[in-house]
Image: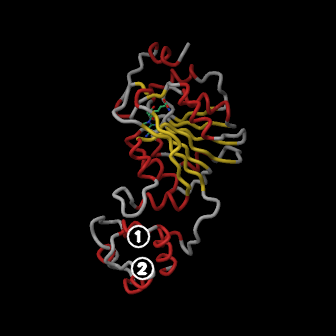
Amino acid sequence: MNAKQILNDNNFIFKKRFGQNFLLDQNVLNNIINTSYITKNTLVIEIGVGAGALTKKLAIKAQNVLGYEIDKTLEKPLEKILKDNDNVEIIYDDFLKRDINQDIKKYNYDKLYVVANLPYYITTPIITKFIEEKVDVEKIIVMVQNEVADRFSARPNSKSYNSLTIFLNYYFDIKKAFTVSKNVFYPKPNVDSAVVVFTKKNKKAFLKNENVFFKLVKDSFSQKRKTLKNNLRNYDLVKINEILAKYNKTINSRAENISIDEFIDVANNLS
Ligand code: SAM
């Protein structure tokens, strides 16, 4: 029996509020798997298991799959769909409320990957969570809305460039792997999607103190339309101005004009 039939038999109702657009196209699913390079000693976290189509394929490649699904009405159908995949565990809970490091503690693995067709309404909080909880992830391969995919690797001076762009690009090399038409989802969403690959940087830029950098970047973007001078009132503005002068910038610049390397230089001189 295929997944669609099992969902029907269990009178499953699609819930828009959970961002439920299931991916059933075998070609796209295979492309995601081929882009991921999962090995047998990989633990894969999947956020939003849905009807388990991606989960099944991940389970074949990975050592273990730890899935999260907020919709408890999927528990019964998923038991049937995944009955032959004994290396899959599913936690029926809101992923955003979990302690990830606690959940993965019991697993023995070499590398941790995240592979998911994300619920679009919480794409940013999900990705931010891995950074905030300092989870040591090797790769994140996620399907997101196409326009969001471009935002992740936005350059300075563009509208989409923000503190998240900076944090993500500090930790990861980010690449849009391929776009996916809205027509391959059920139900069909309003916009096209893209698969984005985040690969942990082998060598991160040198930071004397990560916390100083994170706070500086957050504070600099606290009011996007305002200049650094206004957003960083409690900082040593003379020193910041001195450092920015190297890059032909001043404290009258806005955060969106400052590159990651420039923020790093400022942070290292404040630490
Ligand atoms: N992985 C499936 C696929 O590719 O067909 C489903 C993807 S669908 C876009 C997103 C899934 O995430 C839905 O099954 C939804 O119920 C689930 N979800 C939404 N919010 C969630 C949350 N906070 N925690 C865990 N799962 C969530």
* Residue at x-position 65% and y-position 22%: 84
Q: Considering the image in quadrants, where does the N terminus appear?
A: top right
Seen in the picture, residue 182 relative to 162 is either above or below; the reply is above
Q: Is label 1 within 8 A of ligand 1 (CB to nearest ligand atom)?
A: no
Q: Please, what is the three-letter code of the amino acid marked with disc 2?
A: Leu
Rendering quadrant holding ligand 1: top left
Q: Quadrant of residue 246?
A: bottom left
- Contact, mark 1 vs mark 2 (Cβ under 8 Å): yes
Residue 139 located left or right of residue 265: right
> Which label is found at residue 31?
none
Q: Quadrant of residue 192?
A: top left
Pick the front one: 142 or 59: 142
Seen in the picture, residue 212 relative to 69 is either above or below; the reply is below
Q: Quadrant of residue 42?
A: top right
Instruction: Mark 1: give few (<14), some (14-19) or many (20+) Cα within 10 Å.
Output: many
Find numbered disc 1 in the image and state the secondary structure of the residue it sits on. loop
| Residue 81: image location, x then y, percent | 57, 21
Q: Please, what is the three-letter code of the amino acid marked with disc 1?
A: Ile
| Residue 137: image location, x then y, percent | 60, 51
Pick out the residue farthest to the left: 225
Find numbered disc 2 in the image and state the secondary structure of the residue it sits on. helix
* Residue at x-position 62% and y-position 33%: 58
Pick the front one: 53 or 108: 53
Which badge, 1 or 2, is on the more N-terminal residue? Answer: 2
> Which label is found at residue 258?
1
Seen in the picture, residue 93 relative to 125 is either above or below; the reply is above
| Residue 41: image location, x then y, percent | 72, 42
Q: Which residue is mark 2?
A: 244
